Amino acid sequence: MFQALRIRPATAADAAWILPMSSRLHDFGPPPFRPRDQMDRAVAADIGASLGSPDADVAVLVAEDEASGRPLGFAHVKTFHDYFTAEPHGHVSDLVVAEGAEGRGAGSALLAAAEDWSRARGHRLLTLNVFDANHRARRLYDRVGYLPDTIRMVKVLAP
């Protein structure tokens, strides 16, 4: 655990480390039918569009070491609407912890901040997606109280 960890909203200046760090999302080894470079570009573009956005339904939250200011990770959260009920809810689009900061509380702190962000908007639910093979992330989500909902299945039809 970190002695002093601070969570704050991202600024435009944070793009310099957030966008390159976003590729860590795919370090676990994505499915073979998903080209990693394509995934990295899509995620960076989505996060980049949210950085500095005036939209109150989108936020990028930063975890940093309070003493040094060193970035420890970030969470990208949005308001989504439930498919079945149309109820607005929070959604963690991306959660990335810096190499060397894993297992020390930054991810849990960012998820707690995403919960606070969602509660402040009156949301009853907070959702996220995780790749099946991302076992480390799944253990974290289990540990902090996330429950399985739907499971998305994919069948590759291309030759």
Image (spheres, rainbow, N blue to C red):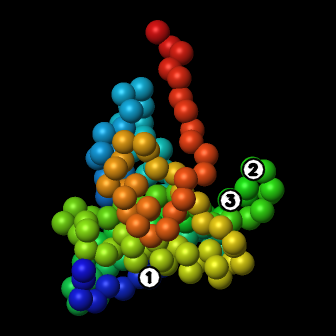
Q: Residue at x 54, y 59 (%)?
A: 147
Q: Secondary structure at mark 2?
A: loop
Residue 36 appears in the picture as rendered: yes
- The residue that disc 3 covers is 80
Kind of residue at badge 1: Arg
Q: Classify 10 Å Cα crowding around label 2: few (below 14), some (14-19), many (20 and above).
A: few
Looking at the image, which is closer to me, 94 or 123?
Answer: 123
Kind of residue at badge 3: Phe
- The residue that disc 2 covers is 83
Q: Is residue 93 left or right of residue 69?
A: right
Lower sequence index among marks 1 and 2: 1
Kind of residue at badge 2: Tyr
Q: Secondary structure at mark 3?
A: strand
The image's mark for residue 8 is 1
Horizontal and vertical percent for residue 155? 53, 23
Looking at the image, which is closer to me, 106 or 53?
Answer: 106
